[in-house]
Image (cartoon, rainbow, N blue to C red):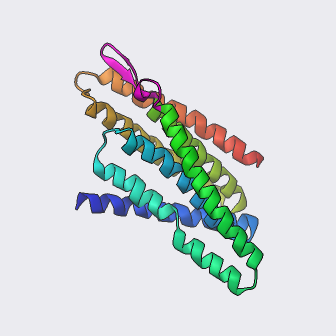
Amino acid sequence: MNQIIAIALGGSFGAVVRFLVSSGVAQWLGRGFPYGTLIVNVIGSFMIGLLAETLMLQRVTITFEYRAALLVGFLGSLTTFSTFSLDTFYLIEQGNLTKAALNIFASITTCVFAVWIGLLCGRGLFYYSDGVIQWSGGMIPYALMTINAIGAFLISLIASILLQKVELSPEYRVVLIVIMVGVFLTLSGLYLLLYQVEQGFSLRNNLNLMLGTFVSNGLICVLVIWMGLLVGRQI
């Protein structure tokens, strides 16, 4: 039951993000070609390659529910093969055979390439000492912190681009950014704390180390989010 609830929660977030990104891209680039579906599928393919390598192949020991929420729930709802198929069929039905062929070719090649890049990034991050810097009585999971930074940059970059293209009041934009940053910092920080607990550390005996990791992750992600917002404004 916990696994089903985790997948449901992850899926709800993924579906909402897919709707916002697809709608924003459609308003930005138009609806003559399914750019929104292509973009969410490419992003989801990269992230599932990165996270699959991290959470499964590298045997990072976090709860199965957390894995299911991320891989099956969030990324499963973020990406969509059915919408890609429907968009392609509509293009064929309208006589746009060139666009239909381009959509099929671009979706398959870019998504497979994105998965491959994600896997390479995950393997590279864990190449040195399994992604952890260790010393007597302490550790820094630099690979997981780097993954958090990559996720923060992608989210802030996409949000920055779309918020400029979608008509929203300044108040709604501020609220969305605050919620986005707050949720990401909380979940990514808790993820690191859970990892440290499963490695034998505890808040009781290693409070300074765990708080330092949590705060460091937050500061790095805030900096990366700021960079993503700045880069997004230039696009």
User: Which range is magenta?
Assistant: 126-142
Residue 74 sits above or below residue 127 on the image: below
Q: Residue at x 28, y 46 (%)?
A: 63
Residue 220 on image: x %, y %:
53, 31
Queried whether the magenta region covers residue 68, the answer comes back as no
Q: Residue furthest top?
A: 136
110 or 25, which lies in front? 110
For the point 51% across and 49% down, the residue is: 47
Q: Which residue is located at x 57 percent, y 49 percent? A: 155
Q: Is residue 220 left or right of residue 12?
A: right
Report x, y in % for residue 128: 46, 24
Quadrant of residue 13 within the rendered picture:
bottom left
Q: Seen in the image, is 86 located left or right of residue 53?
A: right
Residue 172 shows in the view: no
For residue 59, say whether it is visible.
Answer: yes
Residue 18 left/right relative to 95: left
Residue 119 percent coordinates (x, y): 51, 44
Image-quadrant location for residue 133? top left
Q: Quadrant of residue 8?
A: bottom left
Q: How many marks?
A: 0
Nearest the camera: 92 or 36? 92
> Where does the N terminus fall, quadrant-wise?
bottom left
- Residue 133 belongs to magenta span: yes
Along the line of sight, the residue nearer the viewer: 189 or 82: 82
Q: Position of residue 171 (x, y in %)?
A: 61, 56
Left-right relation of 7 to 152: left
Vertical position of residue 122 compared to residue 208: above or below: below
